Image (cartoon, helix red, strand yellow):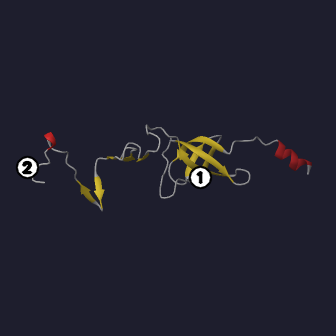
Amino acid sequence: MWLSQRSRQGRREESQAQVGQVTLPGNPAGVYSSGERREMPVFGPGGYQWKPEAGQEVLVLKTGEEGETPCVAGTRYGGSLEPGEIQLFSNGGASIALRRNGNVEIVAAKVLVNGVPLTLEPPAEGGDDGDGGNT
């Protein structure tokens, strides 16, 4: 009994949440925080899928009675959104932003609808929609 109490007392208390750096990308992921842990499941909001990249800073939550089951819960926010706005993005790729003013901003090299490229042409100069005023 004395030995079991002593081993519990000698444990270093760690926070239930830590920031770590992804060492093995994907889901499950490997993350280094106070040491490297592998095969950590990745969680996100419902309807959203995410695979962290190597080197990305992530939030690690320690679950289980003694924090023995860690998981990746999210990444640090680094954008320029206004309160109430939402942005989906891939690092260095496409993004979709829902703005407070009602605008939806899509930034991408190509937009596909059911696998078919969608072509959007900029409005003609002077506000003419190109039909000679016959709208």
Q: CA distance from mark 1 to mark 2?
A: 60 Å
According to the picture, the residue beneath numbered tag 1 turns out to be 40
Query: Residue 106: image x %, image y %?
Result: 33, 47
Residue drawn at point x = 46 percent, y = 44 percent: 84
Q: Quadrant of the C terminus?
A: bottom left
Q: Is residue 119 left or right of residue 68?
A: left
The image position of residue 121, as x and y in percent, is: 19, 48
The picture places residue 7, in percent across and down from the top left corner, at 83, 46
Viewed as shown, does residue 134 lie left or right of 46? left
Quick one: label 1, few (<14), some, or many (20+) residues within 10 Å? some
Label annotation for residue 75: none
SS label for mark 1: strand
- Give the number of the disc on residue 132: 2
Q: Residue furthest bottom?
A: 114
Identify residue type, mark 2: Gly
Q: Work out whether mark 1 precedes mark 2 in sequence or the reverse, and give the earlier one.
A: 1
Do the CB atoms of the residues marked 1 and 2 lie less than 8 Å apart? no
Q: Secondary structure at mark 2?
A: loop
At 47% from the left edge and 55% from the top edge, which residue is drawn?
Answer: 49
Which amino acid, mark 1? Met
Residue at image position (38%, 46%) is 97
Of 42 and 1, nearer the camera is: 42
Callout 2 environment at 10 Å: few (<14), some (14 to 19), or many (20+)? few
Left or right of 67, for residue 100:
left
Which residue appears farthest toward the right when viewing the image? 2
The mark lying in front, picked from 1 and 2, is: 2
